[in-house]
């Protein structure tokens, strides 16, 4: 049993300092300690009587990162390939197990949530809410032969909402990790946790998401994912530290809304699948580009030109993910003095991915809102910044995540980062730019013994 005072002592130990440095960087150790101490103190002292299980005395800490997409824009839903990485922005929680079926969940900045796990059936009135995720994840554990009780949790998420960093997937994996460690000795793999989170989001939360976000949050580090067999994707982990190669990996938030763009997002997989269906296939991964091009006149008539262009993006993006993976493996294997040329090759692939998303996939501007083109403006300005007067590029940029609104991703030379930040914040407001660290650990229970 880990009592509150004992856990606070551990958070202030040398072992914790090493752990926090790994998760957040050496410059964030003190703020991490304060954050976790606050969560523990508020768990013990801040809940109404009866919600904190004082008899258990056992308090445990969990962290799940957000993620950034490195390559493979809109490929997973057609059984393609993706490249993603977990980041230092995370969802964390101090948790106490309960001996009943009640879940009491509190997260900074959000309403308190209560769920009775005696009933694990999906509820229509919970769709889109945190309750649905908790109930759905508990139901899947139970269906897999792991009966679960409840817990009381005090959480804090730094995964920026609406930024393409997968704040919802991070919370799903957080709940899955809590249930797994409390009631199954933490034995499930990152892929198993990801599948549990995805099923809860699909069936209980009511969102037909893919699996890439959950995998990246659960696995940690940079990871290449091949979805040729969607329910058993192939994973390859790679070491990647952009800062070690001289670049800051950033996301820039245009602060445009996603909420009314569902038809735009839904059209992308639908049109890709329509192109595949023309050939009697369920997904584009079952085709090759040559077969598609050989029937181009008939295909255009059947599905329209935009669907054809999106299919061409899919094939090109799959090839780019393979090339990106090869570049990152080479980068990791080389001495620091030999990395510059390899990094330039990787950044050229990032730019190609961005060009393809803009020209072929067409997820930069919504046809519903021709007057709102924040992503296009940000990409154009970043391109001018990185290649002034049409010269050679000193970095790269691309759309980040679903597109149409939200964020772009950029690789900035470290010595030009603050100049670029000033440019972006002057247009889109303070806090627009976030520098990301790729963290090596995915979903973890923090044990400082």
Image (tube, helix red, strand yellow):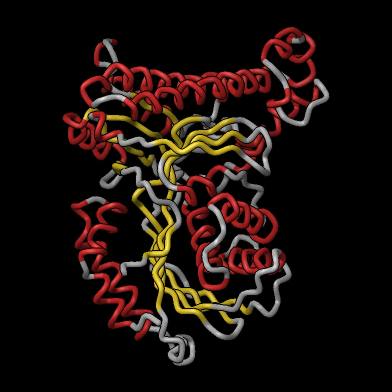
Question: Does the image show residue 404?
Answer: no
Which residue is at a point 34% across and 31% down the rendered structure image?
Answer: 410
Residue 124 vs residue 260, the one in the foreground: 124
Question: Does the image show residue 93?
Answer: yes
Which residue is at a point 43% across and 41% down the rendered structure image?
Answer: 85
Figure quadrant of residue 336 = top left
Residue 409: give x, y in percent of width and height.
38, 34
In this rendering, would 79 be left or right of 252? Answer: right
Residue 420: give x, y in percent of width and height.
23, 32
Residue 379: give x, y in percent of width and height.
38, 27
Q: Quadrant of the C terminus?
A: bottom left
Vertical side of 249 occupied by 214: above or below:
below
Vertical side of 396 occupied by 125: above or below:
below
Which residue is at a point 62% across and 23% down the rendered structure image?
Answer: 310
In this rendering, would 285 be left or right of 414? Answer: right
Which residue is at a point 62% across and 18% down the rendered structure image?
Answer: 312
In this rendering, would 373 be left or right of 26? Answer: right
């Amino acid at each position: 049993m880990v009592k509150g005072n004992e856990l606070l002592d551990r958070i202030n130990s040398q072992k914790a300092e090493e752990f926090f440095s790994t998760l957040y960087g050496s410059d964030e150790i003190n703020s991490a300690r304060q954050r976790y101490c606050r969560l523990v103190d508020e768990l013990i002292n801040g809940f109404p009587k009866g919600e904190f299980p004082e008899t258990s005395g056992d308090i445990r800490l969990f962290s799940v990162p957000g993620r950034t997409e490195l390559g493979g824009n809109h490929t997973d839903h057609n059984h393609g390939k993706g490249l993603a990485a977990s980041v230092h922005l995370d969802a964390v929680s101090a948790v106490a197990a309960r001996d009943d079926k009640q879940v009491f969940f509190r997260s900074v900045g959000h309403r308190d949530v209560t769920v009775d796990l005696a009933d694990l059936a999906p509820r229509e009135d919970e769709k889109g809410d945190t309750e649905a995720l908790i109930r759905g994840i508990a139901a899947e554990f139970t269906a897999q032969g792991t009966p679960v009780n409840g817990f009381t949790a005090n959480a804090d998420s730094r995964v920026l909402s609406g930024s393409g960093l997968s704040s919802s997937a991070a919370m799903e994996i957080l709940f899955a990790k809590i249930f797994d460690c409390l009631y199954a000795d933490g034995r499930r793999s990152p892929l198993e946790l990801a599948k549990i989170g995805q099923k809860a989001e699909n069936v209980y939360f009511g969102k037909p998401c893919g699996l890439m976000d959950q995998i990246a949050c659960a696995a940690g580090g940079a990871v290449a994912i091949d979805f040729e067999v969607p329910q058993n994707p192939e994973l390859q982990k790679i070491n990647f530290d952009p800062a070690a190669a001289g670049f800051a990996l950033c996301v820039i938030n245009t602060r445009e809304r996603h909420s009314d763009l569902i038809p735009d997002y839904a059209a992308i997989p639908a049109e890709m699948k329509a192109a595949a269906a023309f050939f009697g296939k369920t997904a584009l991964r079952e085709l090759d580009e040559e077969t598609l091009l050989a029937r181009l006149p008939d295909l255009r008539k059947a599905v329209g030109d935009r669907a054809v262009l999106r299919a061409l993006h899919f094939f090109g993006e799959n090839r780019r993910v393979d090339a990106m993976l090869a570049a990152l493996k080479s980068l990791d294997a080389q001495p620091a003095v030999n990395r510059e040329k390899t990094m330039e090759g990787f950044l050229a692939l990032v730019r190609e991915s961005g060009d393809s998303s803009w020209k072929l996939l067409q997820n930069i501007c919504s046809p519903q809102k021709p007057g709102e083109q924040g992503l296009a403006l940000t990409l154009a300005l970043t391109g001018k910044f990185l290649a002034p007067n049409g010269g050679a590029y000193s970095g790269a940029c691309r759309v980040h995540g679903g597109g149409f609104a939200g964020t772009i991703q950029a690789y900035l030379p470290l010595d030009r980062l603050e100049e670029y930040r000033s440019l972006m914040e002057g247009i889109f407001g303070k806090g627009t730019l976030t520098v990301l660290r790729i963290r090596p650990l995915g979903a973890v229970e923090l044990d400082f013994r």
